[in-house]
Each structure stands twice: as structure tokens, then as C-alpha cells.
Image (spheres, rainbow, N blue to C red):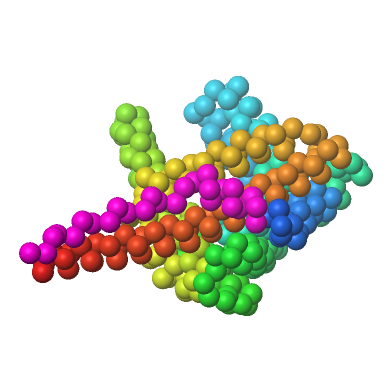
Amino acid sequence: MEKPQVPQPLPPPPGVINAIKGGMDVISSHLSLLFLPVVLDALLWFGPRLSVEDLFSNSFGQMMALAGKSLPGEEIKAVQQLMADWLSNYNLLSVLRTFPIGVSSLMSAKLPVENPLGTQSLIKVPSEGSLLGWFFLLTFIGWALGGLYFNGVSGATGARSKTSSPVRAVFQTVLFSMIITMLLFLIGIPAMFMLGILGLINAGILQAAMFVLALFGAWIVVPIFFAPHGMYLRGQNAFYSIYASLRMARFTLPTSSMFVLVVFVISQGLNFLWSVPADDSWMTAVGIAGHAFVTTALLAASFIYYRDMNAWLEIVFERLKLDTAARQT
């Protein structure tokens, strides 16, 4: 009588720390991958400021005048001052930092006006039509650069199983970004509308609804984070890459959530350090270099983790098939 076969233990899932260490090692030997993040930050630091202040100052003042009928004067003044400062510093060139695929940038959040060479030159956007033209042009350029950036990092990790040409990477990146943008509009606009109605009905109901949305956001953050990876590692199209990310998240959500959380904590925590120097200090260049290295290394780590996690899932599924076949016989 044959002895029943003892199922072999499954290998442990890929570790978060090993993936991050692997990403650091990859970028240490491929410093040329820092070129795009450093150049983008240098443009936002030393380049011209594309200002939209004149276009929005009047309309914002009218909106504040209407809000002043229902809000205390002190709150209106505080909001007015905050928005005035933001509009005066805002640089439309920061749109080059696109999401979820884009070149990492420290200066897109800081919006500096001063630099060690003086004050940025000012270019005013003359009309609403020009604003739309600039916005769409800069967004498209940001997507294209982001595709090249992601494609370059994925290739350096050695995790890529199929060759992805730069042209194909840019095309799939633009398609993917358009899909995600449309989904955000289709979900976000009705959600904001419903939240507004619930806020008018009852503040407690609004808080409960926002809590539910926060839980939903925490659930979808992993699929969104890994959604583009299949395009660069496996040569998948944008639609199948999104599906593959959902499939991976379905089976690995706790571990993958931990990876995303660690990446977020490291990147955002170090951003406070990189942002310490004043905008007109040359030490900001150190912050730009440090930010470029860390964020690019974390991106490389995400590609390594995605490759290893999918390889682990294939082993698990194959083992389950063998165990099921053994039971049936």
C-alpha cells in the first residue's frame, strides 16, 4: 500500500525588507536613472514660474465674498490669505509631476519662488484657453516622461521578463493614465456630490460616510499602486496590467499592504528631511539628490517585489493544483 504523499511546505512570501534592499542596490549601480527626477526638480527650482494668479484671483475673491455671508470674518480672512499665498507661488510647470505614473519630484510640492541665483522669472498665463492648452500639454509630457522613467527603472532591476520598447512604454502609460483619470472622475465626482448632500442632512452621517470611503480607499490602494507594473515587467497592455494587479492584491493583500505602507512611510518621512533647507540655499540640491535616490530606489523595490510576489503566487497555485489532483486520485 502506497504511503500518502506529505504536502511540501510552501515557501514564505517575498519579504518587504529584502525588496527595499534590492531596490537600493539596483539604483546604487545605475545612478543614471536619477537623471529625470533631478532635471525635473532643477527645472522647478531654477526655471520660470508659469503663473495662473491673474486668472484665478478675481474669481476666488468673488467666491470668498459669497462665503463671507455664512462664515465668520476671521475664517474668511485666513482662507483668503492662504489661497492668495498659494496662487502667488503656484507654478503650472508642477503639472509635469503626474500621478499615478510620473517622474518623482520634491519641488512639485514645495513650489519654490526663490533659489540661490535669485527669484524665478515670471511668465503669466494670459487666458483660460492658454491655461487648458498648457495643462494638457504638460500632462501629456509628464505621462511620457513617467513612462520612460518607469520603463528604465524596471529594466535596471533585472525583473523584466519581456522587452518593453520606450515607444510602447509611453503609449501604454498614456493609455493607462487616461483610464485611471476617467475612473477617478466617474467615482470622485458622484462621491463628492453625495458627501455634500449628506453634510447638509447630518454631520454624523457625513462622518460615517467618510469613514466608509476611507476604508474603501485603503482597500484599493494596493491594486492602484501595482496596477502599472505589469506593463513594464511583462509587456502587458494597460487593461490586463490593471487586472493582474487586482488579482495579485486579492491573494496577497495583507503582505502587499505592508509593503505599500513601508514605502509610503519611508518616502514621506524623508521628504520632511529633504525639505528642511531653505529654497535659496544650495543645500536644497542635497535634498533633491537624496529625494531622487530614495524614491527611485523605492520604485525599483516595488518592481522587485511585484516580480517576486507573482512568482510566489505561481508556486502556490501550482502546489494547490497538485494537491487537488492527489486528493482526487
Magenta span: 1-26
Residue 56 or residue 295, whichever sits in front: 295
Furthest-right residue in this view: 117
Q: Percent from the top left, x then y, of residue 275?
A: 72, 36
Determine the residue positioned at 59% across, 48% down. 21
Q: Is residue 136 above or below residue 283?
A: below
Determine the residue positioned at 44% across, 51% down. 14
Q: Quadrant of residue 148?
A: bottom right
Q: Is residue 37 visible?
A: no
Determine the residue positioned at 76% across, 41% down. 287
Residue 28 or residue 210, whichever sits in front: 28
The answer to whether residue 17 is magenta is: yes
Figure quadrant of the C terminus? bottom left
Residue 130 or residue 321, whichever sits in front: 321
The answer to whether residue 248 is magenta is: no
Determine the residue positioned at 62% across, 58% down. 102
Q: Percent from the top left, x then y, of residue 10?
A: 32, 54
Q: How many labels does the image show?
A: 0
Q: Is residue 321 above or below residue 294?
A: below
Figure quadrant of the N terminus? bottom left
Furthest-front residue in this view: 1
Q: In this view, does 5 lie to the left or right of 91?
A: left
Q: Percent from the top left, x then y, of residue 207?
A: 36, 32
Furthest-left residue in this view: 1
Residue 193 or residue 14, whichever sits in front: 14
Q: Percent from the top left, x then y, of residue 180?
A: 47, 61
Q: Is residue 235 visible?
A: yes
